Amino acid sequence: MSIKIGDKAPDFTLVTKTADGPETVTLSDHIGESNILLLFVPMAFTGVCTTELCDITNSINEYADLGAKVFAISGDNPFAQEVWAQKEGIKLPLLSDYEHEVSKAYGVAYEQFLPEANLIMGGVSKRSAFVIDKAGVVQLIDIQDHPKDLPDFAAVKECLKGL
């Protein structure tokens, strides 16, 4: 499935691990509260994913000032995500798409992750950014085919400024 700018964002409910234990996060519960920046990352504990989410953590107030709540999604289990977040100081909600259903719904699941390395891992999320407005409509899509390439965060911020 592929979504386009102007489409209603596919709803989902995913698990995140907090200090109080596992909790669910449902996208539609946040529609109307603020704009939303969804970041899909391939895997916890990898260099580029760690750098990206640490950079976002360091600028989280800037996104809040732009009226956006930020969620990161990966196919890792929530317990691994929690350890990763604690180890690296990642302060944004990490949502577990363990079954890769949300990655598929947003059209960002690799059929085969890093085929040049002969890795047989389908469903891994492509590094991606989606801006969703308060009405739940997708306003920006930035999907990277190579896992080392980052979304254009300047374009993300410009999009948020315009909402």
Image (cartoon, grey):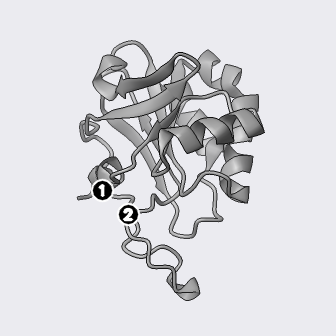
Q: Nearer the viewer, residue 11 or 18?
A: 18
Q: Quick check: 97 left or right of 137?
A: right
Residue 38 visible in the current orientation: no
Q: Nearer the viewer, residue 14 or 18?
A: 18
Q: Are marks 1 and 2 in contact (CB under 8 Å)?
A: yes
Label 2 is placed on what type of residue? Gly
Q: Alpha-carbon neighbours of circle 1 within 10 Å: few (<14), some, or many (≥20)?
A: some
Q: Residue at x 59, y 65 (%)?
A: 147
What residue is disc 2 on? 123
Q: Residue at x 54, y 52 (%)?
A: 41
| Residue 62 spot, x, y in % from top left | 69, 23
Q: Is residue 106 above or below residue 146?
A: above
**Tag shown at residue 104:** 1
The total number of labels drawn is 2
Q: Residue at x 34, y 38 (%)?
A: 138
| Residue 80 spot, x, y in % from top left | 57, 44
Q: Secondary structure at mark 1?
A: helix
Q: Quick check: 38 left or right of 111?
A: right
